[in-house]
Amino acid sequence: MDAVHADHGSSLQGAQAIWSTKMGQELKKKGAISVALFLIIFVISALIATSWVDMSIFPGASSQKALITSAESHNSTQKNHGYSLNCSADHNTTQTCPKTYPTRHEPDYSSSSSEACPEYFRWIYQDLEPWRKSNGISKDLVESGKSVADIRIVVVNGRVYMEKYRGVFQTRDVFTVWGILQLLRLYPGKLPDLDLMFGCGDRPVIRKKDYRGVNAGKAPPMFHYCGDDSSLDLIFPDWSFWGWPEISIKPWESLKKELEESNHKTKWVEREPYAYWKGNAGVSPTRQDLMKCNITDNQDWNARLYTLDWNHEFRNRFKHTNLANQCLHRYKIYVEGVAWSVSEKYILACDSMTLLLNSHYYDFFTRSLLPTVHYWPISQNDKCQSVKFAVDWGNTHPEKAQEIGKEGSKFIEEELKMEYVYDYMFHLLNEYAKHLKYKPTVPPGAVEVCSETMACNAKGLDREFMIESMVKSPSNKRPCTMPPPIKDSDLRDFQERKANLTEKVKMWEASGNFSGFQF
Ligand SMILES: *[C@@H]1O[C@H](CO)[C@@H](O)[C@H](O)[C@H]1NC(C)=O
Ligand SMILES: *[C@@H]1O[C@H](CO)[C@@H](O)[C@H](O)[C@H]1NC(C)=O
Ligand SMILES: *[C@@H]1O[C@H](CO)[C@@H](O)[C@H](O)[C@H]1NC(C)=O
Ligand SMILES: *[C@@H]1O[C@H](CO)[C@@H](O)[C@H](O)[C@H]1NC(C)=O
Ligand SMILES: *[C@@H]1O[C@H](CO)[C@@H](O)[C@H](O)[C@H]1NC(C)=O
Ligand SMILES: *[C@@H]1O[C@H](CO)[C@@H](O)[C@H](O)[C@H]1NC(C)=O
């Protein structure tokens, strides 16, 4: 807990106080929680905005004035083997980027053979399929996405430019752009010129059904954090990998380590033999429905469910929502909010068997997870019964339940290392660029961004998380090697296998008979 809550410095406290007051007013005004998606291991859930105002502490990289007029200056030059963050006067006041970033890095790769990327990288081809079929991406096509995009990111000769079209919830855009900047530091000179439209909301924005018939081939490519079967958004890792300062969720690299350590604290058999969930239940009917499965005087579905009091948490800066101390139950429930929830990785990382509900939306890595292998599927219609069955089964088959829990955690530990998150971005952007039919240029409204313009004048946790997640030196390894594209037949097989496994559990559950189930 304390590690997650290091001293944030007074400037953040001030900012956060203002922010939570605003938030409180907003909530009061709306009379309902319209903000949601948010999660944590002890607390976890997801806070998403269905409608929102820009309440960010740090208004965004394109709001250069806000950065320049910030009261406090940071006169530090942080040198970290190779890369520095040059916050000397030149860069903090004029908001210019140093001219001196390395534009190439060619270490001797001969000693290191390039490793294969995880299987889930194959979804990259799948996501780009519509533009492969329609013979590429023109500038007009990209710009036709302007009306739904929140930001545009352009990379020309290794330098990054950003145009912000509208307000974005909290600092999602800031930490998304930060992530791209770090990718360029990791692989200098290895990314092609790019022109990306990005949607930073909760739900996917490009609907398949709008691009059939006469509109076939006219879908604008849109980067976004999640997708579903009826959308065409290109799935990109969400901001939480670099940190979510508003709710004190640290950058993934260090949080992942803490989670791994906390996993060793309480052995599976010593954990509470129940299914645990804590989060913001107000954001979706499914979550509200799930709350009916909580223990009462008359009924025990083996679920222990807790709602999160947001105002209270903001006041306490999420002190009681520490993720790394939360692997205390044998089963943990994952349930979507407005769309995907960033909590999935934290829940899966726990070694507890994940009970997965309502996985309608996917993010970049979750499509490769399999029921009864990485998690236990919970049926949508009969949630309470289904949770009870899963827990009863697990408690009577602890070895098998632990195995599923371990498999889920292993996936997160091994396949969702930060280096793979960067490699996924790297390959997605490279594959995307292959479809571009024009040479990207800097659009008139865009401003250059770099680690300096973003971090030098940032305050509190924003700054802390940026410094922490900053890439300190270029990689001496090649990015992992992409697996071949998924054959249509393999894709069908995979989906069938997944559906079969889910169906099997459902039938088995209906029979109410534990024995005789073969995986
Ligand atoms: C930038 O840093 C210099 C010191 O190097 C300081 O005098 C100045 O006030 C800073 N500017 C801002 C806007 O923080
Ligand atoms: C900023 O840092 C430089 C180098 O450490 C130092 O020479 C300079 O005096 C500092 N400026 C301020 C305003 O603190
Ligand atoms: C920081 O930037 C200033 C202005 O561009 C430059 O003069 C200085 O040498 C840089 N410092 C470092 C350590 O790179
Ligand atoms: C679920 O039950 C527990 C124990 O009675 C209680 O503490 C908790 O607040 C309940 N959760 C919800 C969402 O009502
Ligand atoms: C799914 O189940 C059907 C019917 O039981 C079976 O024929 C098929 O081979 C299964 N598919 C996979 C991929 O396991
Ligand atoms: C449960 O399944 C097993 C194995 O298929 C079978 O032997 C047993 O009779 C079943 N029990 C009941 C009560 O149906």
Image: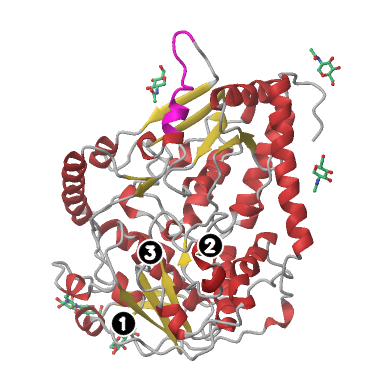
Amino acid type at mark 3: Phe
Foreground mark, 3 or 2, reads: 2
Instruction: Determine which of the numbered discs, if any, sits on residue 175 in the image.
Output: 3
Marks 3 and 1, how far apart at CA: 18 Å
Foreground mark, 1 or 2, reads: 2
Quarter of the image where one finds residue 201: bottom left
Q: Which residues are magenta?
A: 287-298
For disc 2, the marked residue is 208
Residue 434 x/y as whole percent: 59, 83
Near-viewer residue (190 or 202): 202
Under 8 Å from ligand 3: the CB of mark 1?
no
Amino acid type at mark 2: Lys
Per the image, label 3 sits on a secondary structure element best described as: helix
- The residue lying at 55 percent from left, 27 percent from top is 383
Per the image, label 1 sits on a secondary structure element best described as: loop
Q: Is residue 398 above or below residue 408?
A: above
- The residue lying at 61 percent from left, 30 percent from top is 267
Quarter of the image where one finds residue 509: top right
Marks 3 and 2, how far apart at CA: 28 Å
Under 8 Å from ligand 1: the CB of mark 3?
no
- The residue lying at 52 percent from left, 59 percent from top is 231
Residue 31 x/y as whole percent: 21, 37
For disc 1, the marked residue is 446
Foreground mark, 3 or 1, reads: 1
Residue 378 x/y as whole percent: 60, 33
Quadrant of ligand 6 in image: top right
Is tag 3's residue or tag 2's residue first in the polypeptide sequence? Answer: 3
Residue 394 x/y as whole percent: 67, 26
Q: Is residue 13 above or below residue 102?
A: above
